[in-house]
Image: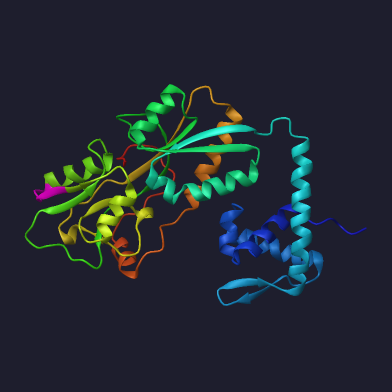
Amino acid sequence: MSAPLDIDQLQTFVAIADTGSFTKAADRVFKTQSAVSMQMRRLEERVGKPLFVKDGRGNRLTVDGDKLLNFARRMIRLNNEAMASFDDNRLEGTLRIGTPDDYADRYMPEIIMRFAKTHPNVELFIVCEPSVDLAEKLARGDLDIALVTHNPRARASDVVRTEPLCWVSSVNHPLPENAPVPLAVGRRDCQWRQAACSALDASGKDYTVLFTSWSSTVVAAAVLAGMAVSVMPESALRPGMKVLSVADGFPALAPVQIGIMKRPGLSPSLSNAITNHITACLDNITPNTVSEEIENDLKGLPRYPRLRQSHMLPGW
């Protein structure tokens, strides 16, 4: 009797088919690229047919691979349904998540996609507000989980990501010479605004707050239009932005740390499920695709391990 196909190998196979890349598939299934390659070699040995061919930098299915894909999707779906039917602890209900809008724009799509696939019976309710407001909502029981800028002086959170905080301007609009630095920042209690102003004060560099907004989209628009300088985490950099360094006369900034806060009394199974998803997603996220100029600017910035205990500075 033929040995059965391995569900884990089939899940990896489907991930490669969906992404067109062994590397991207490795991120999706939380495996190393070498582990993914080994799984596919074993799967090809099992079916006795080649499943992929190189297509430029990516991979595409062979005729036999395309045939297996339909079976693989059906087998995975049936396996998940079977396991769910025996799971007395499967997650159901509503999970209320809070996040600043800049984190929502960069991080939440991946978090929502992965969580929804593994926990389809949980409805996600997303609130976008500054970290200080999210902490207050969590304390009142209006939220279950909050993704916030870590600030041990103001609130307790578990750090899940650390990355550089960068000065940014428009690559297409040079800053005026011999003039105060025009800033576009968050409201007065914004941690990144406080960090930027404190650093400029300490360096003796003149500045003026030209734009204040709770919206990171508005702040980014002011930067891209060449009207102001701002501070942003590395992962939020966009095409058209230039990173300003000490060589440009801007002082170094402490890194950004992102933390998770959880409502007391939240179901441990639900809490662990979403926390694990958030941690895994943030650990796999890389900076946005940016210009070659930005990539060169970033080479001078320090690198930080993604997961670290808290001791540094904050953001919105």
Q: Quadrant of residue 168?
A: bottom left
Question: Measuring 56% from the left and 61% from the top, which residue is drawn there?
Answer: 24
Query: Residue 58 or 125: which is nearer the viewer?
Result: 125
Q: Residue 184: horizontal and vertical position, in percent?
A: 22, 50
Give, as a single range, the part of the protein colored magenta. 203-209
Question: Measuring 9% from the left and 63% from the top, which residue is drawn there?
Answer: 177
Q: Residue 288: horizontal and vertical position, in percent?
A: 41, 59
Tell me, yes or no, whether the highlighted magenta stretch contains residue 296: no
Question: Measuring 28% from the left and 51% from the top, which residue is drawn there?
Answer: 219
Q: Residue 264: horizontal and vertical position, in percent?
A: 49, 23
Q: Residue 202: horizontal and vertical position, in percent?
A: 12, 44
Asked if one can make out residue 157 in the rendered structure from this viewpoint, the answer is yes
Name the quadrant of the C terminus: top left
Question: Compared with residue 175, is residue 198 higher up or lower down, i.e. above or below?
Answer: above
Looking at the rendered structure, the number of numbered marks drawn on it comes to 0
Question: Compared with residue 145, is residue 237 higher up or lower down, i.e. above or below?
Answer: below
Question: Compared with residue 71, is residue 161 higher up or lower down, i.e. above or below?
Answer: above
Residue situated furthest left in the rendering: 178
Question: Measuring 22% from the left and 58% from the top, which residue is drawn there?
Answer: 245
Query: Residue 219 or 154: which is nearer the viewer?
Result: 219
Left or right: where does residue 161 sit relative to residue 186?
right
